[in-house]
Structures are given as C-alpha cells and as structure tokens.
Amino acid sequence: MKALFLSYDGLTDPLGGSQILPYVCGLARKGHSLTVISFEKPERLFKGREEVARTLESAGVRWIPFRYTKRPPVLSTVFDLLKLTLTASWLASMNQIEIVHARSYVPALAGNFVSRLCGAAFVFDMRGFWADERVEGGLWDLRRTHYRAIYRFFKRRETNFLNRAHAVVSLTENGLREMEGWKGIFRLREKTTVIPCSVDLQHFDPSRFTSAQRGQVRARLGLGGHELLCGYSGSLGTWYRPEPMLRLFARIRESNSGAKFLFLTPDSRESVLAIAAQLGVPESALVVLHATRDEMPAYLHCLDVGISFIEPCYSKKSSSATKVGEFLAMGVPVIANSGIGDQDLLLGGGGGGFVIQDFSEDSLRAAAGALAGLRARSSLAIRRLAERELSLERANDSYDAIYRASGTKSRAGFLNRRDGRART
C-alpha cells in the first residue's frame, strides 16, 4: 500500500526513536511504500538527522522533515498545520496515495482533509485523549477564552475523526471502552485496534548481557552484587510523579538500608535531589544520569525493580507507558499505580509487578512489603509477558493488517466512485 504518515512529533525526538521509527520501518519491510512527514526540533534535527535518514533509507522510507515552530503559541501550530496540509495534499495527489495515517490530533486535521481530497483511507492513530491531556496537564487553561475555544474545537473534531476514520488505533482497551460511551460515536469497536506502546525486544534483551557485565555497570553505580537497586526512566513532571516515587523509596530503605534509586532522565539532578532532601532521602542513595537509547538496556538490566507513578486522571485511561514495557522486556518487575491505561491487568493480573491504588502511606507501605515477592519472581516469566503483550513485532503485524484492510476499502471506494461517474 502507498501510505502517507503524518506526525507532529519528530523522528529525532527520543519518543520518535522508540515509538515512530520502528513502526514505519517495520511497515516498509512488510511491503508498504511510506512517505513520512514529521516536525523536528532544530537542535535535535541537527544532531540526529544523518542517523535517522540512514535508518529510513535502508528501510526504503521517504522522509520529509519540517522544522517545528514553537512561537508564538497557537499561531505557530496553525502555521505548521498549513505547511503539513499543503505538502500532504500535493504528495497525495502526485503519488496516488491509498492510506493517510495521522499520528495524533493535529496531524489528523490535515490527514482527514487530505484523505477526502484524494479518496484515500484515513487511519486515525489517536495516541490517547490528546485534548483532555492538554487540559489536565496544565497546558490549556480553560479559564482563558481562547484555550476554551481550542479545547471545544478539538473535542468536536475528535468525534469526526473517530466516525470518519476507516481505522482507529487506541493505545488501551480501557480507553476504547471509555470512547464507546461517548455520545455521537458509531461502530467504533469494529474498526478499532488496540496497540499499546511497544518494545523492540531485540534491543531490550537481557540475554545480550553477561552477569559480569551487569556487575561492572552496578560497580560504576556504587553497588556491589546484592544491594537493592530501584529505577525510573524518562522525563519527570507534568504526568510523572517523583515525589511519591521517592516516598516509596524511603519506605523501601527502612528494610533495605543499602538500597539506591537510579533515575535515568534528561531532567536535572538538582531537581531530583531537592525533592529527596524534603523527604529525608540522602543524596548518597540516589544516582541521576542521562542515558542514550543505546545505553538504556545495560542500565535497566541492573535493576531489581522499576517504579512508574503517573498522575491518575481521566485522560490517562488512554495512556500506555513505554518505560513499563522496557522494564518488563528486561525481566524487571514494576511497581505502578492504578487507573493508568491497561497496566492494572498487565502488572497485577499478568504477574509483571505490583499495582498500588493510590499514593497514601498505607499503599506505599504495602508496595514496599511486596518487594521481596517481586524480586523472587522469574525474570524469564516477566520477559515472556512483554513478548506476549508488548512486542514490536506484534504491533507491526497489527499495523500491517490495518493497512491491508484499509487500502482494500480505499480502492473499493475509488472504483465505486469511478463507476458512478461513468454511469452518469
């Protein structure tokens, strides 16, 4: 199938490297012809352009990177959207595009229009309840008139995207069930595929590392062979809650005095230490590093438990945390909080970890008490959970099935329109 993939996230972003690049390359290797338009932050494009371009070229993917416009707010997004729509319309008309794949809501504005223009199938890869995330994350203040108008605009368009799309991708079953209860949504389940944020199991593979290599990395972190190491990976703030994670760590240290907490984050070390100091967690118990994607598996392999606490709010029903899948892929059990996507079932029912109901002291102490049982679980069984539920290969198979079904509908629609014109 000839597909146009539209993303407002950059392929040179960390998210693009883990959640866009592997998918488009996988689809290309399954025989689809892809053109990708993305919006790149200038500094990241300067550093990462050559590597991303080589990866895409080797897979046979055409890439058109635009510069992301940051200011002024709102108007910059309108400007980027105009560029995206004009370019995508031209490409679709010149290349007989069969599928327009829009990743999230801003690209969907262009994708919906272009698919109508050229008669292509429209795939709405929604990536969560984006408009609600903007509000709950404090990015759109509904007390201000223009943000209130923008929110209402996108909620109306959201309904249109869901109804008009030939195929919808939801990150979670929890999110899909929620959308089925929305007013004005029709026949959603029959055209929706749940594809959580997936993991490259060849990259995040514990068998790549020997016990000696694990010991070397732990030694660099100031650990011997037996001290407990907790870990977190990714940015902090907005949704991710360092304060209750460190409160849990303080409870863990009550029975594991030599324990350390490894933060693999682009955020500043000082911001983590400031919160820890307020909670009485000593600086010596913390290691804060910025790790590249290539370095990440070796660090995760050293962990005894991963911790991921996310602000529990309405929009998080539709969220899937990439870091949780990466922990599981490395055979590391996870302590997480309830109400986030499908992770209650994945970690609790699936045996991949422990789920707390809230951030109360009682819940944190229960999680600390469950730690011995978590460490006794088979790392191989935890790895197999990731293989079964979160593999990149499985995700690519699902996207391939979506493309083949949507492309067939697109061609059928085109032939029906052509026959109708002929009879006229």
Image (tube, rainbow, N blue to C red):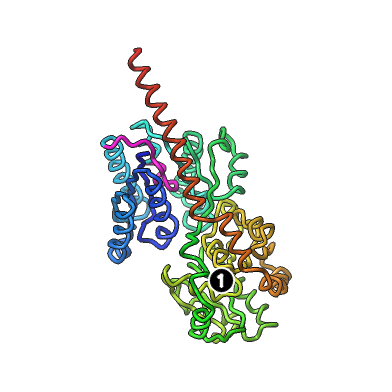
| Mark 1: amino acid | Pro
Rendered-image quadrant of the C terminus? top left
Report the residue at 50% width, 50% height from top.
395
328, above or below 403, in the image: below
Report the residue at 47% width, 52% height from top.
144
Report the residue at 37% width, 46% height from top.
5
Find residue 104 and report its horizontal and vertical position in percent: 44, 48
302 vs 109, nearest the viewer? 302
On screen, residue 206 versus residue 403, left or right, reads right
Neighbourhood count class around disc 1 (C-alpha, 10 Å): few under 14, some 14–19, many 20 upward: many
191, above or below 414, in the image: below
Q: Which residue is mark 1?
A: 242
Find residue 285 and report its horizontal and vertical position in percent: 57, 84
144, above or below 239, in the image: above
Q: Which residues are magenta?
A: 95-110
On screen, residue 69 versus residue 121, left or right, reads left
Residue 105: in magenta span:
yes
Residue 170: in magenta span:
no
